[in-house]
C-alpha cells in the first residue's frame, strides 16, 4: 500500500521528494518521504512482536510522529527506526484496553485470532469480518 501525505518538497541533501504534515502528538511539523509503503491498513488486526498485546489499526503515520519524550522513554537498544510507518491501535491485553503507538517492525498480522475487545472500536468500525474491521460507511471515501 502506498500513502501520500502533506505538501511535497525536495530534500536537497538526498534529492528525494519529502512531504510535511503536522503531528498533534509531536506538536510540530514532521518530514516524511512523499510516498511510503505501509504493510498494514486501517481496520487490520495486529499483534505486537515483543509485548503481549494486540489491536486494531485506526490511523497510520508514514514515519515516527510522536513526542521526543515518548521516543526517548524506549530503551536505546530496543528503539525502533524513525523512518518507517507507525500505527495507532485500539489495543488490548489480558488486563486492559488502551491506545498504542507501534512501529511497523514490531507488528505482525493477527486477524485469525478473532475480534479485539476495545470500547472505541464501534465508534469507527463495523462488525469484525474476515479477520478485519471495515470502516463505518460514513467514514470511508
Image (cartoon, rainbow, N blue to C red):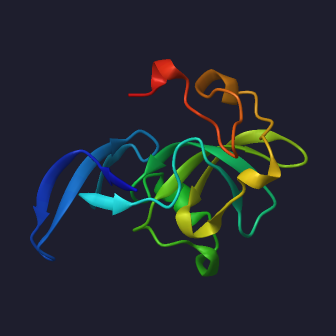
* 2 to the left or right of 60: left
Q: Looking at the picture, how far across and down is residue 139, in whole percent?
A: 47, 24
Name of the residue lying farthest toward the right: 94
**Image quadrant occupied by the C terminus:** top left
Residue 68 position (above or below residue 21): below
- Say if 111 sits above or below 120 in the image: below
At a point 16% along the width and 77% down the height, the residue shown is 14
Lateral position of residue 43 relative to residue 21, left or right: right
**Residue at the bottom extreme of this rendering:** 77
Indicate the quadrant containing the N terminus: top left, top right, bottom left or bottom right. Answer: bottom left
Q: Of residues 107 and 23, which is closer to you in this image?
A: 107
Left or right: 7, with 82 as reference point: left
Snapshot quadrant of residue 102: bottom right
Labels in figure, total: 0
Residue 128 percent coordinates (x, y): 71, 35
To which quarter of the image does residue 130 belong? top right
Image point (72%, 56%), residue name: 110
Q: State the image coordinates of residue 88 (x, y, percent, origin top left).
A: 56, 46
Residue lying at 59% horizontally and 33% vertically, measured from the top left:
134
In this view of the protein, which residue sits in the foreground, 129 or 103? 129
In the displayed image of the protein, which residue is found farthest to the front? 130
Provide residue 92's location: percent of width, then percent of height.
Answer: 78, 45
At 23% across and 57% down in the image, what residue appears?
34
Amino acid at each position: 500500500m502506498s500513502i501520500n501525505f502533506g505538501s511535497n518538497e525536495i530534500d536537497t541533501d538526498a534529492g528525494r521528494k519529502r512531504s510535511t504534515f503536522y503531528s498533534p502528538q509531536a506538536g510540530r511539523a514532521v518530514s516524511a518521504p512523499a510516498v511510503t509503503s505501509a504493510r498494514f491498513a486501517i481496520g487490520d488486526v495486529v499483534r505486537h512482536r515483543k509485548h503481549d498485546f494486540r489491536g486494531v489499526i485506526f490511523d497510520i503515520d508514514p514515519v515516527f510522529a510522536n513526542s521526543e519524550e515518548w521516543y526517548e522513554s524506549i530503551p536505546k537498544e530496543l528503539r525502533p527506526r524513525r523512518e518507517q510507518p507507525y500505527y495507532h491501535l485500539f489495543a488490548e491485553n489480558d488486563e486492559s484496553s488502551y491506545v498504542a503507538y507501534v512501529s511497523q517492525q514490531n507488528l505482525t498480522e493477527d486477524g485469525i485470532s478473532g475480534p479485539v475487545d476495545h470500547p472505541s472500536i464501534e465508534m469507527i468500525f463495523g462488525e469484525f469480518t474476515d479477520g478485519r474491521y471495515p470502516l463505518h460507511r460514513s467514514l470511508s471515501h
